Amino acid sequence: MKVLVTGSNGLLGQKITDLVLSKYPNIHLVATARGENRHAVKSGYAYEEMDISNLDSLQTVLDSEKPDVVIHTAAMTQVDECEFQKEECVSLNITAVENIVKLSKKLNFRLIHLSTDFIFDGTKKMYKEDEQPNPLSYYGWSKLESEKAVLRNSTNYAILRTVLVYGTVSDMSRSNIMLWAYNTLRDGKEAKVVDDQFRTPTLADDLAQGCLLAALYNGNEIFNIAGKDYIGIYELVEKIADMYGFDMKNISKVSSSTLNQPAKRPPIIGLDISKAQEMLGYNPHSLEEGIRICIGK
Ligand SMILES: NC(=O)c1ccc[n+]([C@@H]2O[C@H](COP(=O)([O-])OP(=O)(O)OC[C@H]3O[C@@H](n4cnc5c(N)ncnc54)[C@H](OP(=O)(O)O)[C@@H]3O)[C@@H](O)[C@H]2O)c1
């Protein structure tokens, strides 16, 4: 089976490469991203430059590679940037998906599309796949539109919704909550942490596993792929402090409204993973195991 990954330089993209190289010897992997390959390992798979916002680039690579499955991880993922760069957000998060869906029909590949908890408003603890979306941010709206593009036109797909992804890969384009919290606590820096946001944080390695399980699954479905532990962001920082023996004295609790972030975040949201557990055999690590894997000690 040939699997092509978009955005292979990103956190999830690199974890998918790691997983295929370590556990799926029968999968022929084609990693694609814009610019140079930033994965530390450069052998055992193919790498092609592919800009998802450029239709020619998409067409040329997909036409020549003819994958059986495309795992579409690339997106404009900086939530606040999407509020200011709306055209770029539409181009990357919606138009590119519409183009990939069209190509999936022409070239007959299965599409695994990544989406987000940010399509919801976050007013209750756990969300199943069939809840009513109500995005609070431009990013959330754009990802909801991307889901609609898949549902409208794709004939062979899975949509995977995930939440607060964390992990460590080489040459990362951005940090994540666990690395930020660990480094801030270790260095004794002062920081404000919200005490009114709750999530089911997702280890990127688990999400990569979810992507491969969905790639091998036969059927059109939406799956929540997240961690199994529900926790507040402040409690999460406290947990890391406890696990590694750091002091919380420089960390202060604040409410989200005091941060004045450009994009509104859903306050209370966990993704219920029981459907993926039952239908895909998805079995994520515990939060504590995930933190240790991410921090590397
Ligand atoms: N991270 C989260 O907390 C989270 C939560 C919910 C859903 N998701 C979804 O999960 C997916 C994977 O996220 P992630 O955490 O792996 O994000 P990430 O680390 O930011 O990776 C996204 C990748 O997309 C690439 N990209 C952007 N524009 C591109 C273009 N025009 N052509 C090709 N590649 C392009 C970026 O390339 P550069 O590295 O060159 O910038 C980046 O490597 C995304 O669809 C995201 O919306 C993530």
Image (cartoon, rainbow, N blue to C red):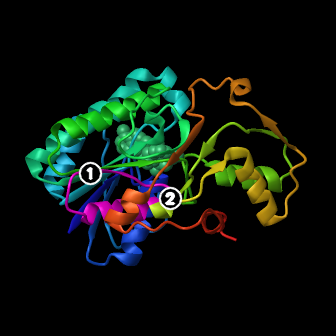
Confirm if mark 2 falls within 8 A of ligand 1: yes
Q: Helix or strand or loop: what does disc 1 sit on?
A: strand
Of 228 and 46, the residue lying toward us = 228
Tell me residue 144's x, y (percent): 36, 33
Q: Which residue is mark 2?
A: 204
Q: Which residues are magenta?
A: 207-227
* Left or right placement of residue 47 versus residue 66 in this view: right
Tell me residue 238's x, y (percent): 78, 53
Considering only vertical position in the picture, is 279 above or below 197? below
Q: Amino acid at mark 1?
A: Glu
Identify which residue is drawn at 42% across, 61% down. 208
Considering only vertical position in the picture, is 126 above or below 19? above
Question: Which label is found at residue 221?
Answer: 1
Tell me residue 127's x, y (percent): 46, 44
Considering only vertical position in the picture, is 259 above or below 96? above
* Residue 20 in view (yes/no): yes
Tell me residue 39's x, y (percent): 46, 61
Q: Amino acid at mark 2?
A: Ala
Of 233 and 92, the residue lying toward us = 233
Q: Is residue 261 magenta?
A: no
Dot 1 and dot 2 residues touching (CB under 8 Å): no
Considering the image in quadrants, where does the N terminus appear? bottom left
Question: Which label is found at residue 202?
Answer: none
* Left or right placement of residue 49 versus residue 61 in this view: right
Identify which residue is drawn at 24% across, 42% down. 57
- Mark 1–mark 2 distance (CA, rounded to whole Å): 21 Å
Q: Classify residue 95 by image quadrant.
A: top left
Q: Helix or strand or loop: what does disc 2 sit on?
A: helix
